[in-house]
Image (tube, rainbow, N blue to C red):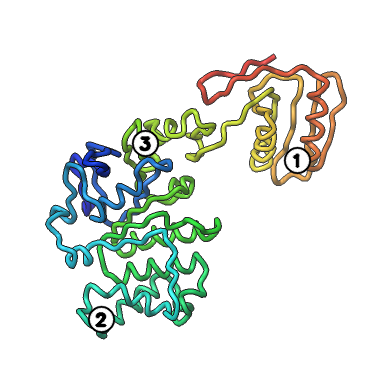
Amino acid sequence: MKKKTIELQQLSIGYKTNHKSKVVAQCIDATINAGELTCLIGANGVGKSTLLRTLSAFQASLDGEIRIQGKPLKSYNDKQLAKVISVVLTEKCDLRNMTVKELVGLGRSPYTGFWGGLSAKDRHEVDAAIKMVQIKHLKYRMVHTLSDGERHKVMIAKALAQSTPIIYLDEPTAFLDFPSKVEMMQLLHRLSREMGKTIFLSTHDLELALQIADKIWLMDQKQGISIGTPEDLSLDGSLSQFFAHKGIFFDKNTGLFRIENEYITAIRMVGHGQKFAMVRKALERNGIFADRKVDAEIMIETGNLNSDKPFVIHVSNNPPIEVCSIDELLTAVTLILKERPFIPFRREHESKSPVHG
């Protein structure tokens, strides 16, 4: 049975200006479980940072209650809270004359007392955190010499050294290249699993979150917060509505978001596997819908990946055209379409069928 670490009961969040309350989100009832990676998704300005600050006790809630490990958040004092929650923020740490090991050691400050000296147990926790995040090779590097990705890992190690059951992260993949984003998300997922941590983070990397997170929180000003596994949110339509009317649609077959192409015509295409998929992708990018079910004067044979045969373009009452690359295929199809009338088209994901000419 899943262990509930964080419980929100009729929570309203926001801030006060000129003695008036500005509500960002309200009536939130939700739980966050131990051993799961939960990702908070939402547009800029929707209130993700406000929610994280409220859950971290950096900002007071407007109404409702937050319970941490069964106790009201308000009942914790600062020292107690430092042993329960650690927070990793987006801001870059610009520290000089401090090694990675020393910075990770600061995570032990809730346990070290006034002078901050590390005991044998503290040093063991620091070394264990460095090993868990796999940055032993950086142990004696100066922090200011690290890359953005390396600094993010160091800050996560510091949070682990703090030995809290809960870790909040604000945009941990910001400023990272794509491989580093993947590595960071996989690391956080592994930590939640192996250490039973409750990891809750905000991110704009929706595609990665959908592939790696155990739970997704979709935060929207109109719809409020929708919570579930990526798969459940796909099935119940929450993901389909998330970017509605923004030029993006959710592909239920792949479980990922796709750009909504503007199609000007449609052609028939037959084939299998990766070659079929790549040709279709290239055509759609150029405003041409391609599918086996389309009835059109133009047909493309892609073959399959194991076939050395060229791509073949068939046009009514004309000899077939063979090309060896997708680039050549696009050029040929463009020339053919200039000589022929367009086939009207309506998008299938709008629950309408293509109109074939």
How many dots with numbers? 3
Q: With 318 as the anchor, is 201 left or right in this view? A: left
Instruction: Mark 3 or mark 1: name the one nearer the start of the chain.
Output: 3
Binning the other alpha carbons within 10 Å of mark 1 as few (below 14), some (14 to 19) or many (20 upward) gives some
Q: Residue drawn at (55%, 58%), measured in percent from left and top?
A: 177
Tell me the distance, in whole angstroms, between the alpha carbons under discs 3 and 1. Answer: 40 Å
Please state which of residues 204 and 32 is positioned toward the viewer in this rendering. Answer: 204
Binning the other alpha carbons within 10 Å of mark 2 as few (below 14), some (14 to 19) or many (20 upward) gives few
Please state which of residues 102 and 186 is positioned toward the viewer in this rendering. Answer: 102
Q: With 127 as the anchor, is 151 left or right in this view? A: right
Please state which of residues 299 and 30 is positioned toward the viewer in this rendering. Answer: 30
Q: Please say if the residues under marks 3 and 1 sit with CB atoms less than 8 Å apart.
A: no
Residue labelled with disc 2: 116
SS class of the residue under badge 1? helix
- Residue 90 versus residue 101 in the image, above or below: above
Q: Residue drawn at (18%, 64%), measured in percent from left and top?
A: 78
Q: Residue drawn at (32%, 68%), measured in percent from left and top?
A: 160
The location of residue 76, given as percent across then percent down, is 14, 60
Binning the other alpha carbons within 10 Å of mark 3 as few (below 14), some (14 to 19) or many (20 upward) gives some
Q: Amino acid at mark 3?
A: Asp
Residue labelled with disc 3: 220
Instruction: Mark 1 or mark 2: name the one nearer the start of the chain.
Output: 2
Q: Nearer the viewer, mark 3 or mark 2?
A: 2
Q: Residue drawn at (22%, 36%), measured in percent from left and top?
A: 27
The location of residue 247, given as percent across then percent down, is 54, 32
Tell me the distance, in whole angstroms, between the alpha carbons under discs 3 and 2. Answer: 43 Å
Residue labelled with disc 1: 326
The location of residue 28, given as percent across then percent down, is 24, 39
